[in-house]
Amino acid sequence: EEEEERVLVSKHSWRPCPTARRRFRGCLEWVKRQLFRVGEDWYFLFILGVLMATISFTMDMIAARLYAAHMWLYREIGDIGVLKYLSWTLYPTALAAFSTGFSQSITPHSRGSGIPELKTILMGVVLEDYLAIQNFGAKVVGLTCTLVCGSTVFLGKMGPFVHLSAMAAVYLGKMRTTVTREYENKFKQHEMLVAAQAVGVATVFGAPISGVLYSIEVMSPHFAVRDYWRGFFSATCGAFVFRLLAVFNSEQETIAASFKSDLNIDFPFDLLETFFFVILGIICGTVACAYLFCQRWLMVAVQKNRLTAKLLATDKPVYTVLVVLLLASITFPPGLGQFMASRLTMKDYLTSLFDNRTWGALAPNASGVAKPGGLWQEWDHPSATIYGTLTFFLLIKFWMLILATTLPLPAGYFMPIFIYGAAIGRLLGEVVALLFPRGLHSEGPPRPIITAGYALAGAAAFSGSVTHSLSTALLVCEASGHLGHILPTMVAVLVANAISQKNQPSFYDNTIIVKKLPYLPPIRSRHIASYRVVVEEFMERRVVALAKGDGFQEVLVALDASADTEYPVVESTESPTLVGTVSRSQLVTFLQSHEHPQAPQGEKLATVGTLGDDCAIEPIMLQFSPWTSLHQAHHLFQLLKLQRVFVTRSGELVGAVSRVEVR
């Protein structure tokens, strides 16, 4: 022992500059204490916002350059029809196939949006490995390839980016516990996830306020006000850096809206136009109901069809190739694509639809005056009017949107429905401008209809009705930098939501239903009879319980009879008064350390005892009575993220209620 101690001392004294190293460690500890005096949450939330903004901007820049290369190849290949068709279709098909194959080979959790799964996680359900950092790279690469496909596939990035933000937040939370030397706290992890969902929206549109509100509406049925500032702080940092990077890249002169439009704010709309905005809300709500029904029907049909189900199970890239090839063939510019402005990017679609000018008035007149330039010319076809191209776009894209949601690749679905709603509003605005060229009042100075205002309201109303959210009204204002139409836009959003929420579940709830995720759905019925349903009518009555005096044999029988994670403990078999719960892991330990009554003498050394003496019984924090209403039970399950609650009558155990019974 003396020799070993002498060796350790000699090794310790051999290290160079022990005094300097000790002072340096002391300085680091002092700096950490000073930095964390204001709270370490600020730093990690700031890092989360800046990190996701940088990734979002880099992803957009790479996608834009690769898409520009595709357009250059299409233009330079010549006038040979076959080569132009191949260059138009094979480029996005190859990228989509690579996106599917690469992401699926690394993790099966990379496909789709990610918001339905995150919504389920925020409700307290554990989805194994869904937020693991190993999925991050697969989702980033796959999503970038999807964005390069452009308007051919017609998919966005908001949903996957919320998933990416959640994965980054979980990883930063683990780093936080390492730096602060604290135990991992589930409440802290939940706070980071709430901030992450706001960052994901804010760094896509550069809209921090609506990003926070939208994330609360879509993903959090119950929101803690203490998390409000975290979401706003992180979302503001992310949106500011996202727009600042555009300035550094010489895309803009200063920080401005993502889809800036020069709308007339002196007289944005006539009071009588509110009637047309109500009609727009009715149209968007009705179309949204049809879209949600058809989308859910197609998702189920694809899973039940023998051929498509086999492809999605074994050859996902083959299914992607077939679907993307069909979509690219439809959007081929010399073909049907010439009637739907297929050469525009997703951003160009919104920029053109938010154009302040009335397209019907820009068409060439009899005097042969030249038409002003702009993206709107992509919508002006010689053999079809503006109204014809917009109508054809809406009819074809309706089914293309639905078909694209079945692709097994990382993709967002909010931007496509946002653009689709803007096209609905633009068409209605052009029709109103055609009927009333001087405005709704024939007397006095002319006050023409601002068609872009209808496009703003249509984008908010349709996307809001599909996702069951109202914050899209503020989102279009932040994204366009125009607040003049906020009131009629809000009216259209309210009307559209009233129709869609009454008749169909939201887009994300559709996905939860189709994927059969363990999510607790909302109670849609508000009939007075639903409030009379009590726990006694649907609780599980056959509950495996243990008594405090039970030994080895009783515990073994209970573990064999049920696979529950925790078991209720009662006072005794004669007096089933609930006293607490014991976990399955503790019961397994109890069996391993105790002797079976029929074991041979001297086979193993073990003690003899009872459950009440040798296991830590956790007290019951919450229990239902048989007369607790369904609405009360549902509210508590959502608010407290419960998994299972025991039911007692006068203190005696009579049953249990889990998420399965509530569903």
Image (cartoon, helix red, strand yellow):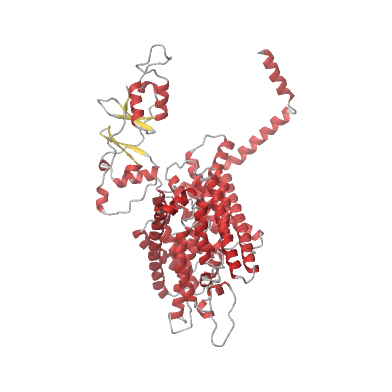
Give residue 243's position: percent from left, percent from top: 60, 58
Q: Quadrant of residue 273?
A: bottom left
Between 403 and 267, the one lying in front of the other is: 403
Question: Does residue 393 appear left or right of residue 500 in this picture?
Answer: right
Report the front residue among 68 and 195. Answer: 68
Residue 459 vs 269, above or below: the answer is above
Q: Quadrant of residue 32?
A: top right
The residue positioned farthest toward the bottom in the image shown? 367
Q: Is residue 179 above or below residue 409?
A: above
Whether residue 64 is visible here, answered yes or no, is yes
Looking at the image, residue 132 lies above or below residue 53: above
Q: Residue 433, position in %: x, y?
A: 46, 78
Residue situated in front as seen by the camera: 297 or 457: 297
Q: Position of residue 245 (x, y in %)?
A: 63, 57
- Whether residue 410 is visible: no
Q: Residue at x 38, y 63 (%)?
A: 290
Q: Say which of 63 and 163 sits in front.
A: 63
Q: Is residue 356 left or right of residue 632?
A: right
Name the residue: 44% across, 65% down. 398
- Report the label total: 0
User: Extreme top residue here?
Assistant: 602
Q: Is residue 241 left or right of residue 590?
A: right
Quadrant containing the N terminus is top right
Residue 242, given in percent of the width and then of the height, sits at 59, 56
Drawn side of residue 190 relative to residue 591, left or right: right
